[in-house]
Amino acid sequence: MTRLSNAFGRLFDALAVAAALMLLAMVVLVTADIVLRNLTRSGFAWANEVSEYALYGMTLLTAPWLLRRGQHVRIDLVLSMVPARFAWLMEAAGDIVGFVVCVVMVRYGFHMAADSFRIGSITIKNLVFPEWWLLAPLPIAFALLAVEFVFRFGRLWRGPTGRRIEATSVA
């Protein structure tokens, strides 16, 4: 199980690097668009739209990586105020609920993408392409999050009964 967890950790690291490269490309694109608009009065009409899609993509790519590092959104203050055993139980409950929510999102995300593909929905803005291209990454990202919740629960179960290290960042 540890080897599998480490392999997923490397995958999550690679996805985070891809998100960072996507951010770099977005910065270059927006900068070039601004320079061109100021110098030539024309830029890339699609630059804002691509930036929107890039933000969405970066969010999906980095979510499992952030969860693994404990840098996702959480309420540290509560966990640092309750007794260690209760904090451990809250962590376990959070991992279980997170897993269930992710599985539900995988199911609905898959059905949304499949339905979009089946009926041939398209996204029409400056760029025109099949809508399912935007929807397909959603169930994949939530499947990766669900896997990480399983690993988190396993690490919590095997570790000491107390707060996770990331639960004490406000203390």
Image (cartoon, grey):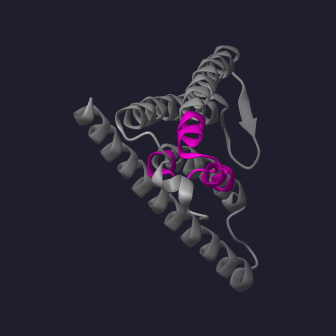
Q: Is residue 75 magenta?
A: yes
Please identify the dominant SS of the magenta region: helix
- The residue at 54%/45% (across/down) is 84
The residue at the far bottom in this view is 39
Above or below, comparing residue 59 to residue 107 in the picture: below
Residue 9 x/y as whole percent: 34, 44
In the displayed structure image, the side of residue 4 where residue 22 appears, left or right? right
Q: Is residue 101 magenta?
A: no
Given residues 138 and 167, the one toward you in this image is 167
- The residue at 46%/54% (across/down) is 165
For the N terminus, give its image quadrant.
Answer: top left
Given residues 138 and 30, the one toward you in this image is 138
The residue at the far left in this view is 3
- The residue at 34%/34% (across/down) is 158
Give the extent of the magenta segment.
66-91
Residue 110 x/y as whole percent: 60, 20
Above or below, comparing residue 51 to residue 98 in the picture: below
Residue 74 x/y as whole percent: 64, 49
Residue 118 x/y as whole percent: 65, 14
Given residues 93 and 61, the one toward you in this image is 93
Given residues 32 and 4, the one toward you in this image is 4
For the C terminus, give its image quadrant.
Answer: bottom right
Above or below, comparing residue 79 to residue 141 in the picture: below
Q: Quadrant of residue 119?
A: top right
